[in-house]
Image (tube, helix red, strand yellow):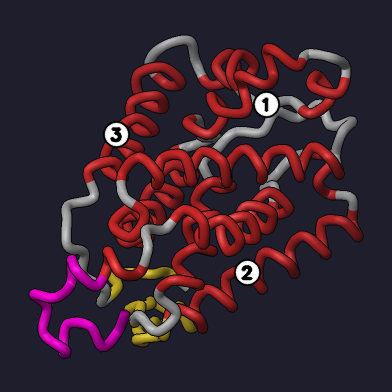
Amino acid sequence: MIPLHDDNPTERFAFLTVILIAINAAVFFLWQVGGVGMEQSIRLAGFTPSDFRAGGYVAEGRNIFTSMFMHGGLMHLVGNMWFLWLFGNNIEDRCGKFRFVVFYLLCGAIATMVYTLFNAGSKIPLVGASGAISGVLGAYLVTYPHARILTLVPLGIFSRTFRLPAWMFLFVWIGFQLLNQAAMAASREGERGGVAFLAHIAGFIAGVTLIFPFRRPRKAQLRRHRMWSPGDQEDR
């Protein structure tokens, strides 16, 4: 399933969401591809669980955050940034700019550390914003469960679009992560690299939990949305 659009307007332009997307794109094109190269950049700024376990707390502690702004390929970057734009603007609007950035980075760090807890001996570097973005998805599920997501569903040679409630789309998404993690664990495929589904799951759970202290009080939200008509609010 590919999300195309959500019927969930924001009061203010999601400036920091755009900044995060721009940083990720700049790191990929100017440093990973056009600078030191993909392999060298991952070795320098990716997060390696086994190095952290071996006592590289300072270097790998830094890399927890640098690895969130790196990607393993163009499609990895595009997919992550599309999800960040589609869902991040509303969470930034609800949290406020400073809280949103802290929330985003904290979800990414938790995702990385939970993955490390269960894969402490892995020598494969982790890169990507997926853990942090999964936290944004978890927050969206809690905050806007009834918003409508225009979703493209490939059906063989045909494709159809559906307007799904956010809770349904995100339940299917997290279910997909759980099934793939179970399959990966059974086949031990994760030892050879690939998608870190466990980090996605951990980030999602972190987002579901942490959004409560990070979102602004409901009273402040109501003050901001008084100018909206009832029709504008029905999907929120």
Does 98 appear in magenta? no
Residue 74 coordinates in the image, percent (x, y): 43, 39
The residue under label 1 is which amino acid type? Phe
Residue at image coords 39%, 52%: 84
Residue 44 coordinates in the image, percent (x, y): 61, 13
Label 1 sits on residue? 47
Mark 1–mark 2 Cα distance, whole angstroms, equals 24 Å
Rendered position, 50 above or below 78: above
Residue at image coords 41%, 57%: 83
Q: Is residue 156 visible?
A: no
Residue 231 coordinates in the image, percent (x, y): 16, 89
Q: Which residues are magenta?
A: 222-236
Residue at image coords 43%, 71%: 143
Q: Is residue 235 left or right of residue 190?
A: left
Label 2 sits on residue? 174
The residue under label 2 is which amino acid type? Ile
| Badge 1 or badge 2: first in the primary sequence | 1
Q: Is residue 162 visible?
A: yes
Q: Secondary structure at mark 3?
A: helix
Instruction: Mark 3: give few (<14), some (14-19) or many (20+) Cα within 10 Å.
Output: few
Label 3 sits on residue? 22
Residue at image coords 43%, 52%: 79
Q: Are marks 1 and 2 in contact (CB under 8 Å)?
A: no
> Which is more toward the observer, 40 or 147?
147
Q: Secondary structure at mark 1?
A: loop
| Badge 3 or badge 2: first in the primary sequence | 3
In the figure, residue 57 lies in which quadrant? Answer: top right
The residue under label 3 is which amino acid type? Ala
Q: Is residue 130 left or right of residue 61?
A: left
